[in-house]
Amino acid sequence: MRRVFGYAASLDTAESRPKEGYAYTKYSIRTNRRNAVLLTVPSMFAIANASKREVFGETFNRMSVDSEGRITAQRILENSTTPRKSLPMPTVLSYLTPLIYEEMLINDRIISPFHRRNRRYYRYRAMPLTKGTALVNFSPRVRSTLLVRGWAQVDEQTGRIIELALDGEYDMVRFHLSTTMDEEKGRRLLPKYCSLNSRFLFLGNDITAEYTTAYGLPSIGLTEEEARLLPVRNAKNAADTIRKIDERRLLERVRPMPLTEHEEYMYRQSVKDSVAADSTDDSKNNKYNRRLLRDVGQALLGRIGGDIGKDKRGAFRIGPILNPLYFTYSNRRGLTYMFDVQGQYNFTDNQKIQARVKTGYSFKQKQFFFNIPLTYYFNNRHNGFVRSEWATGRRIHNSSVLDYVKNWRDNTVNWDSLNLTYFRDHSLKLYAHYDLTPKWGIEVGVNGHRRTAIHDSGFHEAGMPMTYTSVAPLVELTYRPMGYNGPILTANYERSIDGFLGANINYERMEFDAQYIHRISALNSVQMRLGTGFYTHSGKGRYFLDYSNFRENNLPNGWNDNWSGSFELLNSNWYNASQYYVRGNVTYETPQLALYWMPFIGRLLEKERVYVNVLSVSHLTPYVEWGYGVQTRAVSIGVFASQKKWRFKEVAVRFSLELFNRW
């Protein structure tokens, strides 16, 4: 096993990972049982809506390998019997590109049994097989969705894996993967053939799929005319609605293995069904109605995404509009629903534009939120970009306005009953960032806020303005003492001047922040954050205490979106109630910590976390939160307890649905 663990390091990395190659994949997917729930599963809408119980397809892809060994595929040719030639279950395709010798066998999903750091998760048993080879059986020490079991045939002298087979289950998919490794010089860390059998089981739905992939194929050798006519992959379908060239004929040119009689039959039957549908009476109206229902259903229940432009330089992704699986819950915010749209277009390798629309609604707070960042990278190599960020929906508390009214107005009025403390916050931030070196970066811009009173009647009675505006130039310095892979230290300065561009409040604020994620291994890490901020000046009577690095996140989105480094139980008013703050956050994350040994629950756990959050603000020193969280394929759950001035305060639970977030 020492030779197996050290085999990848014994090769020349540049030689063993070619930059580009080609691969052919054929697949068949059979629906054994299905119901309406299948419509809510991203990428499964085509299967749920298909008239046939079995579909078949082929793809020819350009495979690229980056400097870190990650494999990406770009489809060149495709033909299938699915509606609109869409590619179902794309998440399963990542199982066909295993990185045998890396820490993670399949993306961030499966822990590889052939990496030295992972030997603590597996048991191994080796025995002679044939002359010069050995059979290695491996099994997990504890049952887990992150671990697999199987066997590998290994060269005894070098430790090179010749072939292997493994079984596992992840994200509602049970799978069996057989892989034959490439023997060609320069490709010995990559597979030559992969065969995958998978089964998807979810709330009464039963889908089985078979995939076969061959790697290291030559280019298709398109003529100029064929390249010009080749359809461009767009966002809604796997290919254009107008197909100008017969891709099946081109696939026959590169297919490394013949089709079976049953596969040929499915192709012929698909053509007959299409011709029959076109020849029926009133076919145009029927086809239009079916297409309309399919498009509406795909937009509401499916995840839409794909390429933009003839050369596929751009891509966008739209989350399901009515998918009930995308909710988060916390005691304070209640139930929150999210909707997310993302897009990107690459002008060159060094220039691109990104856009995102992230919205949400809190049913308990009855608040609608959105955040819309638009970023243009003018120098991607130096992280040089210009960004505008428009956000609204955040409510801010300001008792200073009420105190000002009490001091300068008629004291006989019950000002507390007029609800003068809460405001809606609309913000627009424009700034530019540039990294001068891998260690130093600078950011300059302007940050504007327009805060409007929620209860305007009280302001009319008090003779006070209902809207308060600030326009603040800002500058931020970034220092990374170890470069991009180490800690990040920032210093932020912001100043709003009364009368500048219509501002009617003024303040001066400074913040300092340090963050670092120390990765112990692929799935073990310690996340640390330490920061402070304070106001050096605030306008008399009219000001808002509002920090950049210490604020409530209204649009959380699962385990990886600000679950660590934030305060889960802190009342939102405390973010805007002190002239200063000092914070510290530490989170430890690991796949096996406390509950992994439990017979049923431990098998479903993917990650566990321990949280410690400490805060000091005016009238609340210290404030401490303790937390423990788990992530499973279906849901993430966190339990948090708080102490205020060393006295126990409350316990709360937060959860978010993780179901199909990786689909």
Image: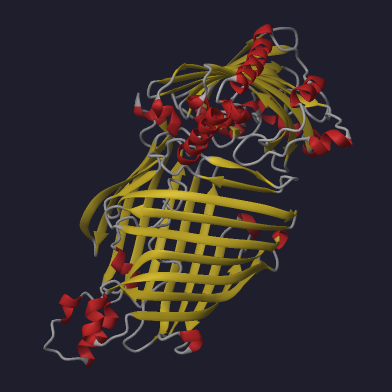
What is the residue that sits farthest to the right in this orientation? Answer: 223
* Residue drawn at point x = 61 percent, y = 29 percent: 93
Q: Quick check: 215 above or below 137?
A: below
Q: Is residue 475 visible?
A: no
The color scheme shown is secondary structure
- Frontmost residue, 287 versus 146: 287
Count of marks overlaid on the render: 0
* Residue drawn at point x = 36 percent, y = 54 percent: 361
Specify whether 650 is left or right of 377.
Answer: left
Image quadrant in which you'd find residue 76:
top right
Image quadrant in which you'd find residue 424:
bottom left
The image position of residue 97, as x and y in percent, is 66, 29
Image quadrant in which you'd find residue 225:
top right
The image position of residue 139, as x and y in percent, is 52, 20
The image position of residue 468, as x and y in percent, is 38, 80
What is the residue that sits farthest to the front in this orientation? Answer: 281
Q: Is residue 119 visible?
A: yes
- Frontmost residue, 122 versus 654: 654
The image position of residue 2, as x and y in percent, is 66, 26
Which quadrant, please, contains the N terminus? Answer: top right
Specify whether 418 is left or right of 98.
Answer: left
Specify whether 47 is left or right of 84.
Answer: left
Q: Quick check: 299 above or below 574?
A: above
- Frontmost residue, 78 versus 22: 78
* Residue drawn at point x = 48 percent, y = 50 percent: 340
- Frontmost residue, 536 versus 594: 536
